[in-house]
Image (cartoon, grey):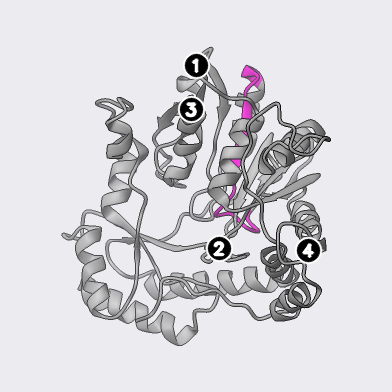
Protein backbone atom coordinates (compact mmCIF):
# COMPACT_ATOMS: atom_id res chain seq x y z
CA UNK A 1 0.00 0.00 0.00
CA UNK A 2 1.36 3.41 -0.96
CA UNK A 3 0.52 5.58 2.08
CA UNK A 4 -1.28 8.88 1.66
CA UNK A 5 1.45 10.49 3.72
CA UNK A 6 4.80 9.47 5.16
CA UNK A 7 7.05 11.95 6.99
CA UNK A 8 10.75 12.24 6.22
CA UNK A 9 13.01 12.62 9.25
CA UNK A 10 16.26 13.13 7.42
CA UNK A 11 18.09 15.75 9.46
CA UNK A 12 19.33 16.12 13.04
CA UNK A 13 16.15 14.85 14.70
CA UNK A 14 17.90 11.88 16.37
CA UNK A 15 20.73 14.07 17.62
CA UNK A 16 18.43 16.67 19.14
CA UNK A 17 16.04 14.17 20.74
CA UNK A 18 19.04 12.26 22.14
CA UNK A 19 20.19 15.52 23.69
CA UNK A 20 16.83 15.82 25.46
CA UNK A 21 17.12 12.25 26.75
CA UNK A 22 20.72 12.56 27.90
CA UNK A 23 20.13 15.86 29.71
CA UNK A 24 16.75 14.90 31.18
CA UNK A 25 14.88 17.79 29.52
CA UNK A 26 12.04 15.66 28.20
CA UNK A 27 8.93 17.49 29.39
CA UNK A 28 7.42 20.94 28.81
CA UNK A 29 10.52 22.98 29.63
CA UNK A 30 13.80 23.15 27.76
CA UNK A 31 15.83 25.15 25.29
CA UNK A 32 14.42 23.45 22.21
CA UNK A 33 10.94 24.83 22.93
CA UNK A 34 12.15 28.42 22.91
CA UNK A 35 14.29 27.76 19.87
CA UNK A 36 11.40 26.13 18.02
CA UNK A 37 9.10 29.05 18.81
CA UNK A 38 11.63 31.67 17.76
CA UNK A 39 12.74 29.87 14.60
CA UNK A 40 9.21 29.30 13.29
CA UNK A 41 8.00 32.80 14.18
CA UNK A 42 10.99 34.32 12.38
CA UNK A 43 10.48 32.09 9.34
CA UNK A 44 6.84 33.18 9.04
CA UNK A 45 7.55 36.86 9.73
CA UNK A 46 5.88 37.08 13.14
CA UNK A 47 7.19 38.49 16.43
CA UNK A 48 6.01 35.81 18.88
CA UNK A 49 5.59 32.05 18.72
CA UNK A 50 3.74 30.05 21.39
CA UNK A 51 4.17 26.30 20.92
CA UNK A 52 1.25 24.10 21.98
CA UNK A 53 0.23 20.46 21.92
CA UNK A 54 -1.49 20.42 18.50
CA UNK A 55 -3.21 22.54 15.86
CA UNK A 56 -6.65 22.18 17.45
CA UNK A 57 -5.43 23.54 20.77
CA UNK A 58 -3.70 26.38 18.90
CA UNK A 59 -7.09 27.43 17.50
CA UNK A 60 -8.71 27.16 20.95
CA UNK A 61 -6.05 29.35 22.53
CA UNK A 62 -6.33 31.90 19.71
CA UNK A 63 -10.10 32.16 20.18
CA UNK A 64 -9.76 32.42 23.96
CA UNK A 65 -6.92 34.95 23.72
CA UNK A 66 -9.34 37.31 21.96
CA UNK A 67 -11.89 36.71 24.75
CA UNK A 68 -14.49 35.54 22.24
CA UNK A 69 -17.54 34.20 24.05
CA UNK A 70 -21.34 34.04 24.27
CA UNK A 71 -23.09 36.29 21.77
CA UNK A 72 -20.02 36.61 19.56
CA UNK A 73 -19.75 35.31 16.00
CA UNK A 74 -16.74 34.05 14.07
CA UNK A 75 -16.92 33.75 10.28
CA UNK A 76 -15.14 30.79 8.71
CA UNK A 77 -15.33 28.52 5.69
CA UNK A 78 -17.65 25.55 5.95
CA UNK A 79 -15.06 23.65 3.93
CA UNK A 80 -12.50 22.97 6.65
CA UNK A 81 -11.65 20.60 9.46
CA UNK A 82 -13.97 20.53 12.46
CA UNK A 83 -11.26 22.01 14.73
CA UNK A 84 -12.11 25.51 13.45
CA UNK A 85 -15.77 25.38 14.44
CA UNK A 86 -14.98 23.36 17.57
CA UNK A 87 -12.83 26.15 18.99
CA UNK A 88 -15.66 28.64 18.57
CA UNK A 89 -18.39 26.35 19.93
CA UNK A 90 -16.23 25.47 22.94
CA UNK A 91 -16.02 29.20 23.68
CA UNK A 92 -19.86 29.33 23.65
CA UNK A 93 -19.72 31.60 20.60
CA UNK A 94 -21.36 31.02 17.21
CA UNK A 95 -19.55 29.82 14.08
CA UNK A 96 -20.92 31.45 10.92
CA UNK A 97 -19.92 29.45 7.86
CA UNK A 98 -19.67 30.56 4.25
CA UNK A 99 -19.07 28.72 1.00
CA UNK A 100 -15.68 28.58 -0.67
CA UNK A 101 -14.30 30.10 -3.83
CA UNK A 102 -14.29 27.35 -6.50
CA UNK A 103 -11.01 28.70 -7.89
CA UNK A 104 -9.00 28.27 -4.68
CA UNK A 105 -11.18 26.18 -2.31
CA UNK A 106 -10.63 28.97 0.27
CA UNK A 107 -13.45 31.01 1.80
CA UNK A 108 -15.44 33.24 -0.56
CA UNK A 109 -14.71 36.85 0.40
CA UNK A 110 -17.95 38.19 -1.08
CA UNK A 111 -19.88 35.85 1.19
CA UNK A 112 -17.71 36.86 4.14
CA UNK A 113 -18.62 40.51 3.57
CA UNK A 114 -22.34 39.66 3.53
CA UNK A 115 -22.02 37.57 6.71
CA UNK A 116 -20.59 40.36 8.88
CA UNK A 117 -22.93 41.58 11.62
CA UNK A 118 -22.50 43.76 14.73
CA UNK A 119 -21.74 40.53 16.64
CA UNK A 120 -18.84 39.47 14.39
CA UNK A 121 -15.66 39.39 16.47
CA UNK A 122 -13.30 37.54 14.14
CA UNK A 123 -12.84 35.98 10.73
CA UNK A 124 -11.01 32.68 10.49
CA UNK A 125 -9.52 32.21 7.00
CA UNK A 126 -8.07 28.77 6.23
CA UNK A 127 -5.30 28.44 3.65
CA UNK A 128 -6.85 25.37 2.07
CA UNK A 129 -4.70 22.41 1.02
CA UNK A 130 -1.69 24.70 0.73
CA UNK A 131 -3.27 27.48 -1.34
CA UNK A 132 -3.32 30.88 0.40
CA UNK A 133 -6.42 32.96 0.99
CA UNK A 134 -6.57 36.36 -0.77
CA UNK A 135 -5.28 38.07 2.36
CA UNK A 136 -4.99 41.71 1.21
CA UNK A 137 -8.70 41.95 0.44
CA UNK A 138 -9.63 40.04 3.58
CA UNK A 139 -7.45 42.25 5.78
CA UNK A 140 -8.98 45.37 4.25
CA UNK A 141 -12.46 44.03 4.97
CA UNK A 142 -11.55 43.14 8.55
CA UNK A 143 -9.93 46.52 9.16
CA UNK A 144 -12.99 48.34 7.83
CA UNK A 145 -15.18 46.61 10.43
CA UNK A 146 -12.66 46.40 13.29
CA UNK A 147 -12.62 42.61 13.22
CA UNK A 148 -9.74 40.35 14.27
CA UNK A 149 -8.23 37.74 11.96
CA UNK A 150 -7.42 34.23 13.22
CA UNK A 151 -5.33 32.90 10.35
CA UNK A 152 -5.44 29.10 10.16
CA UNK A 153 -2.17 28.26 8.42
CA UNK A 154 -2.09 24.60 9.50
CA UNK A 155 -1.82 23.42 5.88
CA UNK A 156 0.28 26.31 4.60
CA UNK A 157 3.84 25.76 5.82
CA UNK A 158 6.09 27.79 3.54
CA UNK A 159 3.24 29.11 1.40
CA UNK A 160 3.56 32.68 0.19
CA UNK A 161 1.10 35.39 -0.80
CA UNK A 162 1.97 38.36 -3.01
CA UNK A 163 0.83 41.27 -0.89
CA UNK A 164 0.38 44.84 -2.08
CA UNK A 165 -0.48 46.21 1.37
CA UNK A 166 0.68 49.76 1.94
CA UNK A 167 2.08 49.98 -1.57
CA UNK A 168 4.81 47.50 -0.70
CA UNK A 169 4.62 44.76 -3.31
CA UNK A 170 6.24 41.72 -1.75
CA UNK A 171 5.85 38.00 -1.21
CA UNK A 172 4.95 37.27 2.41
CA UNK A 173 4.70 33.91 4.12
CA UNK A 174 1.40 32.63 5.40
CA UNK A 175 1.16 32.75 9.18
CA UNK A 176 2.37 36.35 9.29
CA UNK A 177 -0.91 38.09 8.40
CA UNK A 178 -3.42 37.48 11.17
CA UNK A 179 -4.04 39.16 14.48
CA UNK A 180 -3.20 35.61 15.51
CA UNK A 181 -2.15 32.72 13.28
CA UNK A 182 -2.20 29.01 14.07
CA UNK A 183 -0.22 26.04 12.81
CA UNK A 184 -0.38 22.28 13.13
CA UNK A 185 2.72 20.08 13.15
CA UNK A 186 0.92 16.77 12.78
CA UNK A 187 2.74 13.94 11.00
CA UNK A 188 1.25 14.85 7.60
CA UNK A 189 2.45 18.47 7.66
CA UNK A 190 5.61 19.75 5.96
CA UNK A 191 7.09 20.48 9.39
CA UNK A 192 6.14 17.77 11.87
CA UNK A 193 6.69 17.12 15.54
CA UNK A 194 4.39 14.08 15.50
CA UNK A 195 1.74 16.10 17.33
CA UNK A 196 2.19 19.78 17.97
CA UNK A 197 1.03 23.26 17.08
CA UNK A 198 1.85 26.92 17.44
CA UNK A 199 0.18 30.31 17.73
CA UNK A 200 1.92 33.28 16.13
CA UNK A 201 1.23 36.95 16.79
CA UNK A 202 2.90 40.36 16.68
CA UNK A 203 0.89 41.56 19.69
CA UNK A 204 2.85 41.44 22.98
CA UNK A 205 -0.29 41.32 25.14
CA UNK A 206 -1.93 38.56 23.11
CA UNK A 207 1.31 36.57 23.15
CA UNK A 208 1.51 36.71 26.93
CA UNK A 209 -2.13 35.74 27.23
CA UNK A 210 -1.58 32.75 24.92
CA UNK A 211 1.36 31.61 27.06
CA UNK A 212 -0.78 31.87 30.18
CA UNK A 213 -3.72 29.98 28.65
CA UNK A 214 -1.35 27.25 27.47
CA UNK A 215 -0.07 26.71 31.00
CA UNK A 216 -3.20 26.57 33.22
CA UNK A 217 -3.14 30.35 33.71
CA UNK A 218 -0.55 30.13 36.47
CA UNK A 219 0.15 33.51 38.02
CA UNK A 220 3.36 34.89 39.51
CA UNK A 221 2.39 33.06 42.68
CA UNK A 222 2.43 29.35 41.86
CA UNK A 223 -0.93 27.57 42.07
CA UNK A 224 -2.82 30.87 42.29
CA UNK A 225 -5.37 31.29 39.49
CA UNK A 226 -7.85 33.99 38.59
CA UNK A 227 -8.77 32.47 35.22
CA UNK A 228 -9.19 28.97 33.84
CA UNK A 229 -6.62 27.86 31.29
CA UNK A 230 -5.45 24.60 29.75
CA UNK A 231 -2.56 22.21 29.85
CA UNK A 232 -1.73 22.57 26.16
CA UNK A 233 2.04 22.46 26.52
CA UNK A 234 4.39 20.87 24.00
CA UNK A 235 7.39 18.80 25.13
CA UNK A 236 11.03 19.66 24.64
CA UNK A 237 11.47 16.40 22.67
CA UNK A 238 8.72 17.34 20.23
CA UNK A 239 10.21 20.80 19.84
CA UNK A 240 13.64 19.24 19.20
CA UNK A 241 12.18 17.38 16.22
CA UNK A 242 10.61 20.62 15.02
CA UNK A 243 13.89 22.51 15.23
CA UNK A 244 15.59 19.87 13.09
CA UNK A 245 12.75 20.04 10.59
CA UNK A 246 12.90 23.83 10.27
CA UNK A 247 16.60 23.55 9.48
CA UNK A 248 15.55 21.54 6.40
CA UNK A 249 12.52 23.65 5.49
CA UNK A 250 13.77 24.75 2.08
CA UNK A 251 14.61 21.17 1.10
CA UNK A 252 11.21 19.96 2.33
CA UNK A 253 9.41 22.67 0.36
CA UNK A 254 11.46 21.90 -2.76
CA UNK A 255 10.62 18.19 -2.50
CA UNK A 256 6.90 18.91 -2.13
CA UNK A 257 6.85 21.24 -5.12
CA UNK A 258 8.75 18.75 -7.28
CA UNK A 259 6.22 16.12 -6.26
CA UNK A 260 3.32 18.38 -7.21
CA UNK A 261 4.87 19.36 -10.53
CA UNK A 262 5.44 15.70 -11.43
CA UNK A 263 1.82 14.85 -10.62
CA UNK A 264 0.73 17.89 -12.66
CA UNK A 265 2.66 16.77 -15.72
CA UNK A 266 1.48 13.15 -15.50
CA UNK A 267 -2.21 13.90 -14.81
CA UNK A 268 -2.68 17.00 -16.98
CA UNK A 269 -4.25 15.08 -19.85
CA UNK A 270 -6.62 12.87 -17.84
CA UNK A 271 -10.14 13.76 -19.01
CA UNK A 272 -12.43 15.16 -16.35
CA UNK A 273 -9.74 15.58 -13.69
CA UNK A 274 -9.23 19.03 -12.15
CA UNK A 275 -5.76 19.47 -10.64
CA UNK A 276 -4.80 21.61 -7.59
CA UNK A 277 -5.77 25.30 -7.72
CA UNK A 278 -3.12 27.84 -8.70
CA UNK A 279 -3.19 31.63 -8.90
CA UNK A 280 -0.48 34.11 -9.84
CA UNK A 281 -0.57 35.70 -6.36
CA UNK A 282 -0.08 32.46 -4.42
CA UNK A 283 3.02 30.38 -3.81
CA UNK A 284 1.50 26.98 -3.04
CA UNK A 285 3.20 24.13 -1.16
CA UNK A 286 1.25 21.10 -2.49
CA UNK A 287 0.54 20.09 1.12
CA UNK A 288 -1.74 17.43 -0.27
CA UNK A 289 -2.08 16.67 -3.95
CA UNK A 290 -5.77 17.27 -4.57
CA UNK A 291 -7.88 16.13 -7.50
CA UNK A 292 -11.46 17.08 -8.28
CA UNK A 293 -13.61 15.21 -10.79
CA UNK A 294 -15.91 17.11 -13.10
CA UNK A 295 -19.20 15.80 -14.41
CA UNK A 296 -17.53 13.94 -17.30
CA UNK A 297 -16.57 11.28 -14.77
CA UNK A 298 -19.65 9.26 -13.89
CA UNK A 299 -18.35 8.11 -10.49
CA UNK A 300 -18.22 9.95 -7.21
CA UNK A 301 -15.12 10.35 -5.08
CA UNK A 302 -16.06 7.52 -2.75
CA UNK A 303 -16.27 4.94 -5.55
CA UNK A 304 -12.98 6.08 -7.08
CA UNK A 305 -11.21 6.00 -3.72
CA UNK A 306 -12.48 2.49 -3.07
CA UNK A 307 -11.20 1.37 -6.47
CA UNK A 308 -7.80 2.95 -5.82
CA UNK A 309 -7.61 1.15 -2.49
CA UNK A 310 -7.96 -2.12 -4.38
CA UNK A 311 -4.88 -1.00 -6.33
CA UNK A 312 -3.05 -0.51 -3.01
CA UNK A 313 -3.27 3.28 -3.22
CA UNK A 314 -4.27 5.06 -0.01
CA UNK A 315 -6.26 8.28 -0.38
CA UNK A 316 -8.17 10.73 1.80
CA UNK A 317 -11.54 12.42 1.23
CA UNK A 318 -12.06 16.14 1.06
CA UNK A 319 -13.61 17.80 4.09
CA UNK A 320 -17.31 17.37 4.79
CA UNK A 321 -18.63 20.89 5.30
CA UNK A 322 -19.36 22.10 8.80
CA UNK A 323 -22.95 22.84 7.76
CA UNK A 324 -23.50 19.12 7.02
CA UNK A 325 -21.95 17.81 10.24
CA UNK A 326 -24.54 15.96 12.36
CA UNK A 327 -22.97 17.13 15.61
CA UNK A 328 -23.63 20.77 14.71
CA UNK A 329 -27.03 20.14 13.16
CA UNK A 330 -28.05 18.43 16.40
CA UNK A 331 -27.09 21.65 18.21
CA UNK A 332 -29.43 23.63 15.97
CA UNK A 333 -26.69 25.19 13.87
CA UNK A 334 -26.76 25.73 10.10
CA UNK A 335 -30.41 24.71 9.64
CA UNK A 336 -31.41 24.38 5.97
CA UNK A 337 -28.10 25.91 4.87
CA UNK A 338 -26.95 24.94 1.38
CA UNK A 339 -23.41 25.65 0.21
CA UNK A 340 -23.08 24.12 -3.25
CA UNK A 341 -19.34 24.52 -3.78
CA UNK A 342 -18.47 22.94 -0.43
CA UNK A 343 -20.95 20.13 -1.02
CA UNK A 344 -19.57 19.43 -4.50
CA UNK A 345 -15.96 19.38 -3.29
CA UNK A 346 -16.74 16.76 -0.66
CA UNK A 347 -18.55 14.51 -3.10
CA UNK A 348 -16.20 14.93 -6.07
CA UNK A 349 -12.75 15.47 -4.55
CA UNK A 350 -10.01 13.59 -2.75
CA UNK A 351 -6.26 13.68 -2.41
CA UNK A 352 -3.56 11.29 -3.49
CA UNK A 353 -0.40 10.06 -1.71
CA UNK A 354 1.73 13.16 -1.33
CA UNK A 355 3.97 12.95 1.73
CA UNK A 356 7.46 14.39 1.87
CA UNK A 357 8.92 10.88 1.62
CA UNK A 358 7.05 9.82 -1.54
CA UNK A 359 9.27 8.65 -4.43
CA UNK A 360 8.97 9.30 -8.15
CA UNK A 361 8.40 5.58 -8.68
CA UNK A 362 5.46 5.67 -6.27
CA UNK A 363 4.00 8.71 -8.03
CA UNK A 364 4.13 6.92 -11.38
CA UNK A 365 2.40 3.91 -9.78
CA UNK A 366 -0.34 6.13 -8.37
CA UNK A 367 -0.90 7.84 -11.71
CA UNK A 368 -1.15 4.51 -13.53
CA UNK A 369 -3.78 3.38 -11.02
CA UNK A 370 -5.75 6.64 -11.41
CA UNK A 371 -5.76 6.25 -15.18
CA UNK A 372 -6.90 2.63 -14.87
CA UNK A 373 -9.71 3.46 -12.47
CA UNK A 374 -11.01 6.42 -14.48
CA UNK A 375 -10.81 4.96 -17.97
Circle nearer the N terminus (4, 2): 4
Q: Earlier in the sequence, mark 1 or mark 4?
A: 4
Q: Residue 20 lies in magenta, yes or no? A: no
Q: Secondary structure at mark 1?
A: loop
Q: Is residue 57 left or right of residue 102?
A: right
Mark 2 and mark 1 residues within 8 Å of each other at the beta carbon: no
Q: Residue 297 vs residue 102: left or right?
A: left
What's the magenta region? 144-159
Residue 178 seen in the current view: no
* Mark whose residue sits in front, 2 or 1: 1
| Residue marked by disc 2 | 189
Query: Where 291 falls versus 362 (above or below)?
Result: above
Image disc number at residue 71: 1
Residue in view at x 51 percent, y 65 percent: 188
Q: Which residue is mark 4?
A: 32
Q: Is residue 273 left or right of residue 204?
A: left
Q: Earlier in the sequence, mark 2 or mark 1?
A: 1
Q: Residue at x 77, y 57 (%)?
A: 29
Res. 112 mark: 3
Label 2 or label 3, whichever comes before in sequence order: 3
- Tag 1 or tag 3, which sits nearer the N-term? 1
Amino acid sequence: MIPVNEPLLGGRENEYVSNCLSTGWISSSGSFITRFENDWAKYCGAKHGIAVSNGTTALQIAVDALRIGPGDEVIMPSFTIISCALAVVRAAATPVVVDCDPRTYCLDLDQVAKAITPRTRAIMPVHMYGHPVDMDNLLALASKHGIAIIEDAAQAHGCEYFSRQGGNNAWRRCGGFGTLATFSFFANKLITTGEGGMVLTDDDVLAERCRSLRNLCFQTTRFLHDELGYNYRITNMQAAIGVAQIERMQDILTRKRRMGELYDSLLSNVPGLILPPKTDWAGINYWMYTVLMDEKIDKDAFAVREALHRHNIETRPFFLGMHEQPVFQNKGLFKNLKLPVTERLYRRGFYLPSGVAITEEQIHTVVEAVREVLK
